[in-house]
Image (spheres, grey):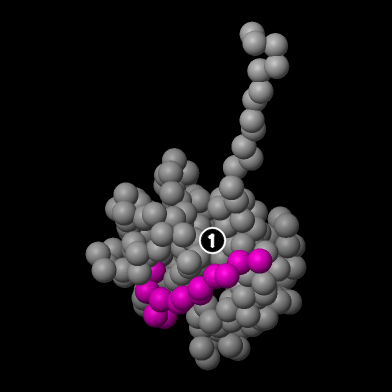
Amino acid sequence: KTTFAVASTFTADPLEFPLRGWFERLGLQGQLTFTGYNQVLQGLLDPQSEFFEIERGAIFVLIRPEDWMREYATLPEGEALHAALSERAHEHVAAVKAAEPRLKVPLILLVAPRSPEWRSNGMRSESVRLAEEILVTGLAETAQATVISSYDICERWPQFQGPDLHDAVSDRAGHVPYRDEGYAILAAELMRRAHETLRSPFKAIVVDCDNT
């Protein structure tokens, strides 16, 4: 069976409907599972993790670096915040690399677009930029992991650079940072990359017709 597992630093449940829509569109008989809320590191580091049992499918990891700020709410903006978010990014890179030898399927890490609040705040925006750079460069040479950067997403979907796809109220209330349309775009990005990664390679049959 084909299994897609989802782990995220924010509430990922709204991804279920658009992901299942893609399963139907692509003719996949896929099983979709979600780890517990904000269980990215646990999913990567726990030896009994479901991630290591999947033999066909993909693992979707969604990280929005500003979510880590919830652990550092008392830190002043500037170098201290830069250091804290960078440290968290390095931890996640190390966790992916530690998990990689045991993974049987691709891991697709999506760096989710930052909120308008963080985009408009120079120091916070720089902290997030540095953390994302660590994730992207740190996983660039891994065999099983591939990264979709927030910059690639915003280039393809410029709506993310404004307020239309974000929901500050639901983010504060339930850590649901995007409107349904935003989650639909993230699902499309994940499935696009998964389809590229999982589709069978073209096989060429060479026939020697002149015995040379």
Q: Position of residue 4 (x, y in %)?
A: 49, 67
Taking the view exactly as shown, the residue that stands out farthest to the bottom is 173
Callout 1: few (<14), some (14-19), or many (20+) C-alpha neighbours within 10 Å? many
Residue at (41%, 76%) from the top-left corner?
35
Residue 75 in sight in this render: no
Q: Which residues are magenta?
A: 27-40
The residue nearer to you, when weighing 107 against 53, is 53
Residue at (57%, 70%) from the top-left corner?
29
Q: What residue sits right under mark 1 in the picture? A: 110
Q: Position of residue 128 (x, y in %)?
A: 50, 61
Q: Quadrant of residue 193?
A: bottom right
Q: Quadrant of residue 180?
A: bottom right
Q: Please determine whether, in this image, residue 157 is positioned above or below residue 201.
A: below
Query: Total marks drawn?
Result: 1
Q: Position of residue 33 (x, y in %)?
A: 46, 76
Asked if residue 165 lies left or right of residue 197, the reply is right
Asked if residue 115 lies left or right of residue 51, the reply is right
The residue nearer to you, when weighing 145 against 69, is 145
Residue at (58%, 79%) from the top-left corner?
16
Q: Secondary structure at mark 1?
A: strand
Residue at (50%, 65%) from the top-left corner?
2
